[in-house]
Image (cartoon, helix red, strand yellow):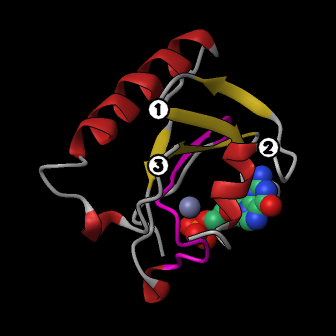
Amino acid sequence: MNDCLFCKIVKGEIPSTKIYEDETVYVFEDIAPTAPVHYLVIPKEHISKLDEINETNSAVISHIYEVIAKIAKDKGLKDGFRVVSNCGESAGQSVFHIHFHLLAGRPLTWPAG
Ligand code: 5GP
Ligand code: ZN
């Protein structure tokens, strides 16, 4: 867990461009954006991936969605946005600290590949 990239970003040991922060959630710009708006929304506590959510840690996940709705309002994402969380390597997860990609600012095709 000490080697976790996103835990280091939360602690400020690795720099990031902060979009939003509160007691339990941190939001920052993705280093390799795939859309004009590409933020990563993460819990400050270390949860590796979606299938580790359970009744003891799910409160922060519902709070994450409140934060996403607030950011969407504050940033004026009126034309729509997408939230993605890849779970596991074959789904494209490369950083094993749960994160929610918030994508907007261009047409987003569906279904995703
Ligand atoms: P995943 O592939 O796990 O769904 O998403 C991980 C995301 O983290 C990728 O979009 C990648 O660009 C981003 N990322 C990886 N390393 C860093 C970093 O050091 N800083 C920031 N801001 N984003 C990172
Ligand atoms: Zn972590």
Residue 78 visible (yes or no): no
Position in image of residue 112 (x %, y %): 46, 67
Horizontal arrangement in the rendering, residue 107 relative to residue 80 (left or right): right
Task: Please name the residue shown 52% across and 12% down the image.
Answer: 73
The residue that mark 1 highlights is 24
Ligand 2 neighbours mark 3 (CB distance < 8 Å): no
Gap between marks 3 and 1 measured at Cα: 7 Å
The residue that mark 3 highlights is 45
Give the mark nearest the N terminus, 2 or 3. 2
> Given the current orientation, which residue lies at the most extreme bottom position?
90
Horizontal arrangement in the rendering, residue 14 relative to residue 110 (left or right): right
Gap between marks 2 and 1 measured at Cα: 15 Å
The residue range painted magenta reads 92-106
User: 92 or 52: which is nearer to us?
Assistant: 52
Q: Can you say whether 84 is above or below 61 in the image?
A: below
Task: Please name the residue shown 68% across and 34% down the image.
Answer: 105
Q: What secondary structure is marked by label 3?
A: loop
Q: Quadrant of the N terminus?
A: bottom right
Gap between marks 2 and 3 measured at Cα: 14 Å
Task: Return the mark for residue 12.
Answer: 2
Give the mark nearest the N terminus, 2 or 1. 2
Q: What secondary structure is marked by label 2?
A: loop
Q: Amino acid at mark 2?
A: Gly
Task: Please name the residue shown 52% across and 63% down the image.
Answer: 97
